[in-house]
Amino acid sequence: MATATQQKSTTASARPSLQSSLGQLVRRPETGSVLGMIAVFVFFALAAGKIFLSPAGFASWLNVAAEIGIVALPVGLLMIAGELDLSVGAVIPASSLTLAVISGHYGQPEIVGILAALGVGLLVGAANGFLVIRTEVPSLIVTIGMMFAVMGLTLGFSVMLTGSTSTSIVPDAFYKGLLGQFIGGMFQVTIFWWIAFALVIGYVLHVAPWGNWIYALGGDKISARNAGIPTERLTMSLFMTSGFCSAFVGISQAMVYQSAQVAGGQSFIFNSIMCVVIGGVLLTGGFGSVIGIVLGTITFSMVNQGIYFTGFDPNLGSVIIGALLLLAVLMNDTFRQMALSYSTKKKS
């Protein structure tokens, strides 16, 4: 009798433990993105077969994921904080052309062009942050205006200085290997930079105290300010980080393709936002994770490139991406409601 009673007690205690584990899993922001990534990978693995699973297949979407991912990480931080940055699509070609004009057209050392290009990104980010803080105009409007302003300035300076809308650059072997090399002839070195950026930003959001500030800022800006959080400095830092990362991608593109053009980078605007949303970050702010953003970027890139490995019409790629985005928003909202419901039940 005692043994049977102990077994019943053990079984009863195991059930709440299992429920608690499931509840904690549901509360994770990246739960939906994990399921989505697995589903997309299995779909294309079955539809495309060995081509998609080959090293060349992996390289095709990893290279895309790396460039978009470096931009999506700071955009994700901004969205968690309740802000948005659409100027990334203008910063990328602006920084790329800055490097190409200084080091390609005028023949200055690459380090000078790289520092100037990063400076352009930081300057645009600082301008965005300043305008958002001082005018209290929504960041969506501010960054749209900044995007068009930077695009116009980039075009004007490019034509004025070089007489063309594109400029070539032949980088030094060291900088080419550091920022624009293909490893094994297929994998861009940018992939390793993406991993490095993800680790640093992951530390900031999930380990350092700044992470709690970012979540608080996205939850309620007024309450965060009243709690003593330096909301203005934090907002400025986030926009400057976005500008820096966008400039880095522009530099990398100039090194990879050995040229820079005025008309480039616009696709990063909505692609980065889609990666972030697919990764579980709420459009309303206050919820998300770096792991989710990385997984969302991988999912988006697999869809973006995987369609070309199948026998489907490539035009269906946009349809699938659109459907995936809508599904991601619905899944994120569902998991968030489940998380809130679980938290309420746990308290009661």
Image: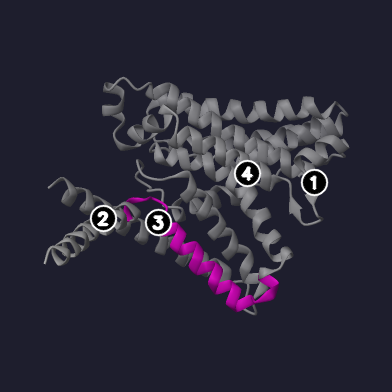
Numbered mark located on residue 194 in the image: 4
The alpha-carbon separation of the residues under discs 1 and 2 comes to 49 Å
The alpha-carbon separation of the residues under discs 1 and 3 comes to 34 Å
Residue 311 visible from this viewpoint: yes
Look at 67% across and 62% down and name the residue there: 58
Image position of 311 with respect to 216: above or below: below
State the residue position of label 2: 17
Magenta segment's dominant SS is helix
The foreground one among 297 and 55 is 55
1 vs 3, front mark: 3
Q: Position of residue 256 (x, y in %)?
A: 78, 46
Q: Are marks 1 and 4 in contact (CB under 8 Å)?
A: no
Q: Position of residue 175 (x, y in %)?
A: 81, 35
The foreground one among 308 and 129 is 308
State the residue position of label 1: 181
- Packing grade of label 1 (10 A; few <14, some 14-19, many >=20) is many
> Residue 13 vs residue 205: left or right?
left
Look at 75% across and 40% down and name the residue there: 179
**Which of the marked residues, 1 or 2, is nearer the chain's N terminus?**
2
